Amino acid sequence: VDEDDLNVSGAQGSDADKEPTLISGNFVIEEGADGIKSYQIEATSPVLADLSSGGEALEWSNGSPVQNGTQFTYTAQTLSGEAVFTMVFDTADNSYQFNLLQPLDHALADGENEIELGFNISATDFDNDTTAPQTLTITVVDDIPTITSVEPLSVDEDDLPAGSDGNQPLEVSGDFTTTQGADGVVLYRIDPTTNPVDGLSSGGVAITLDPPTINGDNQYSYVAKAGNVEVFKLTLNADGSYSFELKAPIDHAD
């Protein structure tokens, strides 16, 4: 299943053409004369180990599996009680259904990566004979945010203290337009593999970019300097807004 297809409060996936986050299949089993009484996830199954959603570890809800006729429902929830996914087994037709309700926490900064959930499943007949467990694998594909547009900004060096005008602001602001994805966006930053000041200078001195200053609200502030002189400051806020302040002139082409 793909997290970009989620369509629930607090977890809107980025795919505009939604597909179901509920998938189903059937077990192939030789039932024998006694018939199948239940399917169960083995207690030794490590499926919830190291899983989390929104930073919270997962656990099976109290009473899992809940039986309703021939159906047995397991609910994985956060420690605060929010349901993240369900697995339903039905002995009437030997089927299973997996329903993703909230995003899982995937590897950080790893793009649209996958988590494989391995459920160790066994079946028990009415004589209480139990099969050897088999692994049912469900793959959950991460959703990722996309910046769809950036509002360009402009400042004039003639508004600097030594400039010829001085009537317009040197600090301007704008907003990103972002498709956040199921996990939401918690911060904006400059791609650390890039150098936006490469080749720039001020007063003949090469401009360098200091490491960002990060506050408790995930605001990233970058200061560009020529030697010890601050040239500009770029501030990226977690809400998608940003500001640019020019403090010294940048050398332009003759």
Image (cartoon, grey):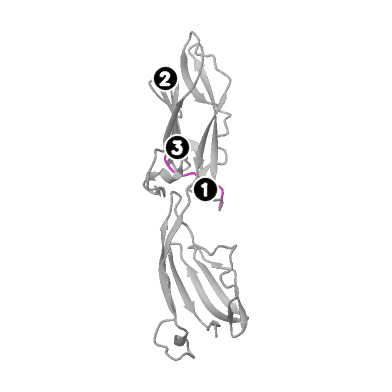
Instruction: Nearest to the eye among marks 2 and 1: give it.
Output: 1
Q: Compared to 152, does 33 lie above or below?
A: above
Return the x and y of residue 69 as percentages of the image width and height. Answer: 38, 20
**Which residue position holds label 3?**
85
Q: Is residue 12 left or right of residue 114?
A: left
Task: Return the residue nearer the eye: 42 or 120.
Answer: 120
Q: Mark 2 is on which residue type?
A: Asp
- Quarter where residue 159 is shown: bottom left
**Which residue position holds label 1?**
112
Q: Please check the rendered image and state whether residue 102 is part of the magenta-colored stretch, yes or no.
A: yes
Secondary-structure class at tag 2: loop
Structural distance between the alpha carbons of marks 3 and 1: 19 Å
Structural distance between the alpha carbons of marks 2 and 1: 34 Å
The numbered mark, 3 or 1, whose residue comes first in the sequence reads 3
Structural distance between the alpha carbons of marks 3 and 2: 21 Å
Instruction: Nearest to the eye among marks 3 and 2: give it.
Output: 2
Residue at image coords 49%, 60%: 187
Q: Are marks 2 and 1 in contact (CB under 8 Å)?
A: no
The numbered mark, 2 or 1, whose residue comes first in the sequence reads 2
Quadrant showing the C terminus = bottom right
Residue at image coords 50%, 72%: 234
Structural crowding at the residue carrying mark 3, measured as other residues with C-alpha within 10 Å and reported as few (<14), some (14–19) or many (≥20) = many
**Which residue position holds label 2?**
93
Q: Which mark identifies residue 142?
A: none
Q: Mark 1 is on which residue type?
A: Glu
The numbered mark, 3 or 2, whose residue comes first in the sequence reads 3
Task: Return the residue nearer the eye: 17 or 105.
Answer: 17
Q: Please check the rendered image and state whether residue 153 is part of the magenta-colored stretch, yes or no.
A: no
Secondary-structure class at tag 3: strand
